[in-house]
Image (cartoon, rainbow, N blue to C red):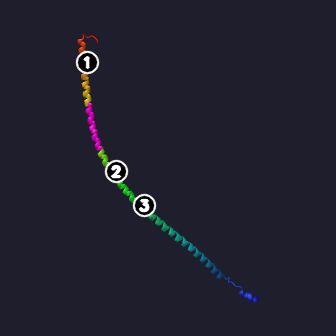
Amino acid sequence: MLEHAEQHIPTFDLSENVIHGLSENVRIGDEVAESRLMLDMVVTCQYMGENNLRIIGDDVIGLKANLALLEQSNEVLRVDIERLKGVSREEMAQLREEMGQLKGRVEENHRENQRGFAEFRQGLAELKDMIMSLKGESGGSQV
């Protein structure tokens, strides 16, 4: 039985070449595993980069649309400003005309007032003369 048991015990070759070969296999396996991890990381980064580029592209498309809307709004505003400039010019011309008319009326009223004051002074002088003549006729007596 012992002979039989000895035959089944595996024997390991622990020579330097075998140990070196095994450690080399482990090192290569570790490098392969590390390379796979790096490749996975590269693929993940590439996917994230492509996704970010897609997002940036969508943002650029959105910005182009917003820019087109802003250009339309600016054109509408430009037209409105030009229209308002025209209205302002027309209104200013109308106001100048009205101011000229008002100035003419004020000058006419001033002349009429001057004539009225002159007539009033003349009437007052005539009244004073009448009073003086009445006073003179009554013999200078005081009323």
Query: Mark 2 belongs to which amino acid?
Result: Ile
Would you say 38 lies left or right of 127 here? right
Q: Quadrant of the C terminus?
A: top left
Could you say whether the residue bearing mark 3 is in a helix, strand or loop? helix
Could you say whether the residue bearing mark 2 is in a helix, strand or loop? helix
Query: Mark 1 belongs to which amino acid?
Result: Lys
Residue, disc 1: 128
CA distance separating discs 2 and 1? 67 Å
Prevalent SS, magenta region: helix
Would you say 92 lies left or right of 10 here? left
Q: Is residue 59 positioned above or below 84 on the image?
A: below
CA distance separating discs 2 and 3? 26 Å
Between 81 and 141, the one nearer to me in the picture: 141
The stretch of residues the image draws in magenta is 92-110
The disc at residue 81 is 2
CA distance separating discs 1 and 3? 91 Å
Q: Is-magenta flag for residue 95?
A: yes
Counting other residues with Cα less than 10 Å from the Cα at mark 2, is it few (<14), some (14-19), or many (20 or more)? few
Q: Nearer the viewer, mark 1 or mark 3?
A: 1
Position of residue 122 measured from the top left corner of the image (x, y, whole percent):
24, 23
Position of residue 11 measured from the top left corner of the image (x, y, whole percent):
70, 85
Counting other residues with Cα less than 10 Å from the Cα at mark 1, is it few (<14), some (14-19), or many (20 or more)? few
Compare marks 1 and 3 and give the one earlier in the sequence: 3
The disc at residue 118 is none
Would you say 59 lies left or right of 121 here? right
Position of residue 116 measured from the top left corner of the image (x, y, whole percent):
25, 27
